[in-house]
Image: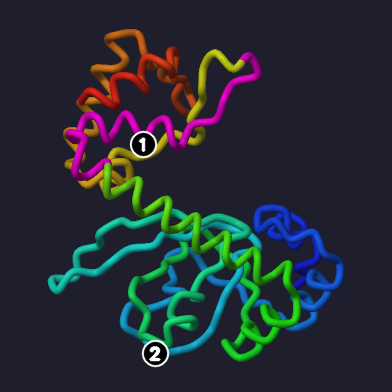
Amino acid sequence: MDSRPFWPTAFERLGIHDAQAEAALIAAAEIRSVASGSVIIAQDDDDDMVFIILDGEARVVLLSASGQEIWIDALQAGAVIGELAVLTEQRRTSEIIAEQDCMLACFPARDFLALSADHGALGLALARVLAQRVHHTTQRMFELSALSATGRVYAELLRISEPSESGETRYIRPKPTWTVLAQKVNTSRETASRTISDLEKRGLLRRLDDGFELVDPDQLSRLSSTN
């Protein structure tokens, strides 16, 4: 499998712009393909591999004692996964599942840590990854404690949207399913669906064939902080 076309995106998203670090990562990587629905990392496992997603998407979940999935995060190309267990020398704290067919660059823990020590650009990129995860987790904890279910849906719609060319509206493509949207904000599918319908009636959201248009993102942002 030729992974060369996918590395530049991963390097860009990781913020690595050092030719030596890039070459070292490519040389050390074992490339694997993982089918959609497959478990990349199993919760409570004690393996020590680190992965970089080169192509595809994955989801991070926690599994309850009854086997219920609690949604934690979505990961795309450029994401580093498995590094936390390696740095803490603990078992895996979450399950990571391929949401689409994925191409992964895989590194044994010892090799990845050595690369991080030898190449400052990689060590800095890893620090950024951890800092972003802390920020992301803190934001979600705040939303769960401070916002209603409706407010959390508003916040998630803004988070997953992209600005239009004019910057006045935002788009969400592809259209998220009610189940996934509900899982992300810890509410019911019915609440997510009802919130979207209400926004549409108020003229703040427009349904498209392939997604949603947020007509007034500023107003939606204000609503998210008061609900």
Dividing the picture into quadrants, the one containing residue 64 is bottom left
The reply, left or right, for residue 69 in relation to residue 95 is left
Tell me what residue is drawn at x 41 percent, y 19 percent.
Answer: 207
Which residue is the site of mark 1?
A: 156
In terms of sequence position, does the residue under pointer 2 or pointer 1 come before the other? 2
Measured along the vertical axis of the image, is residue 218 above or below residue 36? above
The reply, left or right, for residue 62 in relation to residue 38 is left
Tell me what residue is drawn at x 57 percent, y 65 percent.
Answer: 127
Quadrant of image for the N terminus: bottom right
Query: In this picture, which residue range is highlighted in magenta?
Result: 143-166
Q: Is residue 193 magenta?
A: no
Residue 79, position as x, y percentages in the image: 57, 61
Which residue is the site of mark 2?
A: 46
Q: Chief secondary structure of the magenta span?
A: helix
Residue 62, position as x, y percentages in the image: 28, 66
Q: Secondary structure at mark 1?
A: helix
Measured along the vertical axis of the image, is residue 49 above or below residue 174? below
Residue 202, disc: none
Q: Is residue 157 magenta?
A: yes
Tell me what residue is drawn at x 58 percent, y 58 percent.
Answer: 56
Report the number of numbered marks.
2
Residue 38, position as x, y percentages in the image: 44, 71
Quadrant of image for the C terminus: top left
Q: Secondary structure at mark 2?
A: loop
Q: Nearer the viewer, residue 73 or 126?
A: 126
Tell me what residue is drawn at x 51 percent, y 22 percent.
Answer: 170
In space, the residues marked 2 and 1 are separated at their CA atoms by 33 Å
